[in-house]
Amino acid sequence: MTTDLEIKMHFLSFLLAASALATSALTGRATADHVEEAASLAKCQTPIMEQVPGCGANVIRFYYDEKNKTCKSFIWNGCLLSGIFNLLHDCVSGCNKGQSVPFCTGEPVSKCAQSDSSGQGNMMMMKRTAYFYNATSHTCEEYEVCRAAPPTESDNYFPTKTNCELQCRGF
């Protein structure tokens, strides 16, 4: 037969276990929040650029340069994992909200005139397809470019749609 004292002891044990479980759950959540915050801050640290043998494809990715306080692009070989952003927008949003991106807001450069349909008017000009970022529609749009000189870093000019989207999508 169970006495009142045994019932009270079982109840007390239950309360102690419940409070320990609640404390553990709360501490775990605080730890998870801390880990998430630390991971976010770690992304905004300049990654160690080193060659790792046997790594895969080379693609454009972005990192935050702590020294210059800007997000920069580089050719990623797929090996380095920390501090890498798929999009420039992700890097700027997470690490440097004040960074400007003039190449995503300007007019398309060296757009071919409508009258130059042949593309053969000037031997120095080469007519080719390029892309620019339309900040109003938030899309990369195709256009014909007539240009003798290569574009500058601040031009809204991209040789491929993928390059345009990597640099400007989200702005």
Image (tube, rainbow, N blue to C red):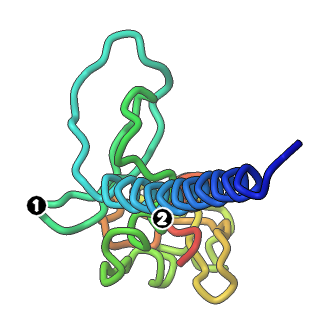
Q: Nearer the viewer, residue 92 or 111?
A: 92
Q: Residue furthest left?
A: 67
Residue 85 in the image: state x and y as whole percent.
Answer: 44, 52
What residue is at 35 percent from the left and 48 percent from the top?
83
Residue 14 falls in image quadrant: bottom right
Q: Residues within 10 Å of mark 2 (few under 14, many from 20)?
A: many
> Where does the N terminus fall, quadrant-wise?
top right
What residue is at 58 percent from the left and 84 percent from the top?
135
In the displayed structure, 97 sits above or below 62; it is below
Q: Nearer the viewer, residue 166 or 65?
A: 65
Q: Residues within 10 Å of mark 1 (few under 14, many from 20)?
A: few
Residue 144 falls in image quadrant: bottom right
Q: Nearer the viewer, residue 50 or 29?
A: 29
Q: Is residue 56 left or right of residue 161?
A: left
Kindly identify which numbered label has been placed on residue 16: none
Q: Earlier in the sequence, mark 1 or mark 2?
A: 1
Q: Is residue 57 left or right of residue 38?
A: right
**Callout 2 amino acid:** Asp
Residue 85 seen in the figure:
yes
What residue is at 33 percent from the left and 69 percent from the top?
95
Residue 128 seen in the figure:
no
Residue 90 in the image: state x and y as whole percent.
Answer: 48, 64
**Mark 1 and mark 2: Cα distance apart in space:** 19 Å
**Callout 1 amino acid:** Lys
> Circle 2 sits on which residue?
90
